[in-house]
Image (tube, coloured by chain):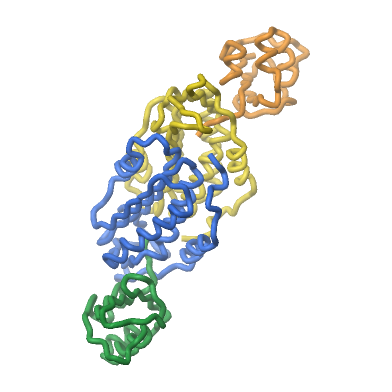
Chain colours: A blue, B yellow, C green, D orange
Amino acid sequence: MTVRVQREDFDVGAEIAALAGGRTDIGGIATFLGLVRDTAGGERIAAMTLEHYPGMTEKMLGEIEAEAHSRWPLDASLIIHRYGRLEPGDRIVLVVTASAHRKAALDSCEFLIDWLKTRAPFWKLEETDAGAQWVSARKSDDAAAARWEEVPDPKPKAAE
Amino acid sequence: MTVRVQREDFDVGAEIAALAGGRTDIGGIATFLGLVRDTAGGERIAAMTLEHYPGMTEKMLGEIEAEAHSRWPLDASLIIHRYGRLEPGDRIVLVVTASAHRKAALDSCEFLIDWLKTRAPFWKLEETDAGAQWVSARKSDDAAAARWEEVPDPKPKAAE
Amino acid sequence: MKILYFAWLRQRVGAGEETVDLPDDVRDVAGLIDWLKSRGPNYREALRDTSAIRVAVNQEFASLNAAVAAGDEVALFPPMTGG
Amino acid sequence: MKILYFAWLRQRVGAGEETVDLPDDVRDVAGLIDWLKSRGPNYREALRDTSAIRVAVNQEFASLNAAVAAGDEVALFPPMTGG
């Protein structure tokens, strides 16, 4: 279980390789990589600045990661979230989960990205043609995160 | 849309970077990486050999990939599947899907790995302490693939 | 008490962080927000709509009726938009 | 007709690929399998349980009653275990 909150970019291939790290009990590694898009709600985005709450961010991400490990049989996991000014195409967030079972890796990866969207203290300021605008929280993100509120099966449905 | 069936290993980070390739309309990239495990059904696996049906494999993977593009709004996708002799910890399969919407990327990635498990003409021969054994198809894999038989929403549930 | 502001709350208040001497009669988050609003138009403007404000006390999410005390770190911010 | 065998079917038949002259009365996959079984004990053993056999005709999955003709490429193999 690793959480990193950093201004610097990250190397996806190197992170995945480090997570697997010569282990031979991992059957599947699921990854979600979030990138900055050049549009939002039809508006052109020149850049965005991610602000966060140092200390609490790491704490919340660690709690969300621990929750994933309690729900699925994970061998390893990693969350990296950047802050600072980012441009379209830049990497923002990386979630990696490894398990003997592919379903556990895939489900927990989706869980982590859904939860950190609504529970990690980050705020996005977008630079649009109309000036700088704080991004509003989306109902669809709340709904995606709420799906995981029900107590799920402790084991993946399709044993591998 | 790219399909590669190859004996050689692949570089996950480079493949993901090439897929995104300077594009600024991609919001999320989902990846599933399958690795060879050192055990199966309690037995120790020294290595496995993947046999496939050259020609038909590429054709089936291409059809499965096209099906994913018809079901989800994907910007790009990649399937790499290796054949030949592999040892525990080795990479076997890589599925990468990119979309403006994270849910589309995640769902289509899961769809692709579920379908290729049961529809791509590969066969695994495992080297165990008891000798070489052909892997049996798993009911759980059939069930995972069958989940996608129902006609799904053409659009992701949580618009982004 | 240390108070932190993020995103547009920080911009409207005009500070990201301040240390305040809490009046004795402020015992919960709602009371803290009311007292802050009495401190000037920037606070009144920033804290006008409490439905748009999320709160953390000592880096844990908290509700408006959560207790606060002198040694606490309280953060006020809009709904989060990470990921 | 070109016939391909994979995995344990290939091992039991003893060949991965062969070209055969199809008798006129073989018109579907089931008929082809019956005819192959008449060709020797290795075929009989390999093709004994048709429920364990999957078929592709010209690289498309096909059922036991799918039609086959002289120019076709027919593949016989166990259920797939990729991924």
What is the residue that sits farthest to the right in this orientation?
D25
Which corner quadrant of the image does residue C34 belong to? bottom left
Residue C74 in the image: x percent, y percent?
Answer: 30, 77
Q: Is residue B18 visible?
A: no
Q: Nearer the viewer, residue C15 or C1?
A: C1
Q: Which residue: 34% across, 54% down?
A: A93
Total numbered badges shown on the rendered structure: 0
Q: Position of residue D9 (x, y in %)?
A: 61, 18
C39 or D16, nearer to the observer: C39
Q: Position of residue D19 (x, y in %)?
A: 61, 10
Residue B58 is left or right of residue C62, and the answer is right
Report x, y in % for residue A102.
49, 42
Q: Residue furthest top?
A: D40
Left or right: where A88 falls relative to B100? left
Quadrant position of residue A118 = bottom left
Question: Is B95 drawn above or below residue A61 in the view shown?
Answer: above
Above-or-below relation of B114 to A38:
above
Q: Is residue D21 above or below residue B103?
A: above
Residue A143 can be seen, yes or no: yes
Q: Viewer-proximal residue, A56 or B102?
A: A56
For the N terminus of chain D, the image quarter is top right
Q: Residue at x 53, y 39 (%)?
A: A160
Q: In percent of the image, x 38 and y 49: which residue is there?
A: A77
